[in-house]
Image (cartoon, rainbow, N blue to C red):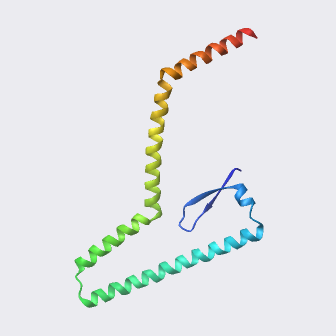
Amino acid sequence: MPHARTETSVGTYESHSTSELEDLTEPEQRELKAKLTKLEAEIVTLRHVLAAKDRCCGELKRKLGFTALVGLRQNLSKSWLDVQVSNTYVEQKTSAALSTMGTALCRKLGGIKKSATLRSFEGIFNKHMLNQGRNQ
């Protein structure tokens, strides 16, 4: 198995060669996994704290008489920012970029396949193979 994939706290996968993983001793791997678990728990806690503070902020704004329209605009801006940093959005952007790159690469390879230079190499190769078959 040349590569192993590990899931990060945000749900994306990172590829590591097995030689990288083999360089770590069992205790080092356990320590790193424990650190990762702790960090993921802290992230969850911070998200909960942020949500509570966001609710408190909304309540204060309501008490201060900020209009619903201003709040709606701020909520939409915040929601859009959340969407932009979400895994799905990032994955869609990455997928779209890879798709575009793949399409361009296919077009380029198709152009190369149709080129006169490649066809002349094919002709030479086929003649060589034909001659090899006759000589045996």
In which quadrant is the C terminus drawn?
A: top right
Q: Residue farthest to the top?
A: 134
Residue drawn at x 65%, y 74% as measured from the top left: 35
Residue lying at 44% horizontally and 49% vertically, measured from the top left: 97
> Which residue is painted at 47% across and 83% down in the image?
49
Q: Nearer the viewer, residue 115 or 26?
A: 115
> Can you tell which quarter of the image residue 38 is in?
bottom right
Q: Which residue occupies the foreground of this view, 128 or 10? A: 128
The residue sitting at the bottom extreme is 63
With 96 as the anchor, is 122 left or right in this view? right
**Camera-nearest residue between 96 and 109:** 109
Residue reaching furthest to the front = 117
**Quadrant housing residue 60:** bottom left
Q: Is residue 58 left or right of residue 105?
A: left
In x, y percent, where is residue 65? Answer: 23, 88
Query: In the displayed structure, does residue 1 sit left or right of residue 9?
Result: right
Count of numbered labels shown in the rendering = 0
Residue 46 percent across, percent down from the top left: 50, 80
Query: Where does the image place residue 23, in percent across and percent down from the top left?
Result: 75, 61
The structure residue drawn at horizontal position 40% and vertical position 64%, both measured from the top left corner, is: 84
Return the x and y of residue 27 as percentages of the image width and height. 76, 71
Q: Is residue 135 above or below residue 121?
A: above
